[in-house]
Amino acid sequence: METANDPFSIFYFTFAFLQEGSQILGLDPFLLAVQLVIFFIGLALSALFSGSEVAFFSLANRLEDLKQDESLGSSDDRIIKMLNKPRRLLATILIGNTFSNIIASVLAAVITGEIVAFYGLSEMVVFTVEVIVLTFMILILSEITPKIIAINNPIKISRLYSGPIYVLFILLKPFSKLIADSTISLERYLPKPVSKMTSDDIRTMAEMSEKEGSIKEDEREIIENVIEFGTTTVREIMTSRVNIVAVSIDNSLQDVLTNIRENGLSRMPLFDNDLDNIIGVIYAKDVLPYLNADEKEPSLNWKTISRKALFIPATKKLDDLLRDFQQEKTHIAIVVDEYGGTEGIVTMDDILEEIVGDISDDDGEEQDMYTRFKSGIYIFDAQVDLDDIEEILEIELTTESDEFETLGGLIYHLTESLPNVGERILYKDLELTVHSVENNRIRKVRVTIDRKDEEAAAKEGNE
């Protein structure tokens, strides 16, 4: 045949090497064949150990599930016994894999030496080729391929290899235990690994858990709120200055009692002259003894029953504020700006709402944030957070760089002045109309959504 005379034919090469080469070198053809067989056995064993390493340790996180499985077989029992001692199992597999690679490497060197002697080739060239070919074969046949198979079929591969691996697990116990104990000693001198899980990883896990039905939507929102808790500043959740309900040092007892009844507040700042001079905090429970006081009774000296006020900057993070509340044993703080003026107040309830969402008042009454009419027009309270409006209208209104938080703040930002009733502002796909103003403050805003762009896009899609 023409192929038999082809000097580059693998069949001719193998035949010539085993027949003529063995005669010239005085070697037995059978011995050469055995060497090749042992070489490939070494590669096969290396593949077995590489695949079993991945397969066994892929089941490490499912060990409890395996133990509770009622249909356990003898192979599963062996797997559980070995995974209960992971260091020793890993040492056993690595010992076997190392010896397998040594066998393959030694046989490759022997066969290569015989090729050099047979053909009279340059040793440097032949051994360079041997290193390249052997490395390629070990990587493809003994490392990458078996590990890919094991990753896709961990249980099947573990059960298949559990028998021979368990035998070695027992036979190599003295050596594997020594290696395992050595790694424990070395770990004492190594830096402990730091978890690299980021907030984005946790958020992604929460979203996936919600999709799978493991957690509910409100639970996912709480997780996300906790993640953002450490980066949220007081300014983002505080009650702004214009909405502060406070007690003047000149107020009468009845004024304060009326304030408490109407607003349902348990704590109010006490100020002298104006809100930039807050001198304490009045607790509703401290005023209770005076509920039945005569209306003609002169005003109290509020300083005598007021408590020390906690002052904080607007840039303070919520986790730091929570620690301040714990240390000072208070539930309210006065937020000041860089000049010492009062910017707002923040309470423990504000912090809790940032984590778990809106908390209703004790009397169970909750004012609606908005009213929706059939025409698609909304009337919003100007103090509603823009985040809530975005959820209701399903439209994006703000960015992280924006300094305003409420609908009223957005209008002030756009107009840069106090707008008149009926004044219209166009913003993105919304028409904002000032519905009512009281005491130089925007109270209600009419919001109309411009759906023309969406309708036009829908028509184009239908065409």
Image (cartoon, rainbow, N blue to C red):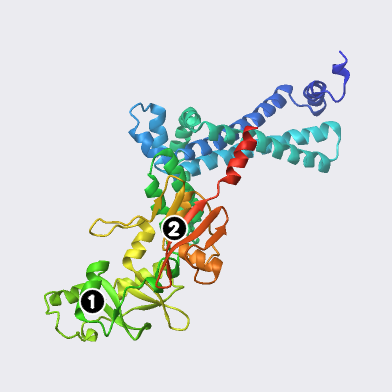
Give above or below for 162 relative to 322. above
Q: Type of residue at label 2?
A: Ile
* Residue at image mark 1: 256
Give above or below for 367 relative to 122. below
Q: Residue at x 70, y 22 (%)?
A: 30
All told, the count of numbered labels is 2
Q: Which residue is outermost to the front?
A: 422
Label 1 sits on a secondary structure element that is helix
Instruction: Give the mark, 2 or 1, whose residue is nearer the N terminus.
Output: 2
Q: Position of residue 376 (x, y in %)?
A: 46, 47
Q: Is residue 101 visible?
A: yes
Q: Position of residue 130 (x, y in %)?
A: 76, 38
Dot 1: within a 10 Å radius of its alpha carbon, few (fewer than 14), some, or many (20 or more) residues?
some
* Residue at image mark 2: 227
As drawn, is 100 to the left or to the right of 392?
right
Which residue is nearer to you in this view: 227 or 307?
A: 307
Q: Quadrant of the N terminus?
A: top right
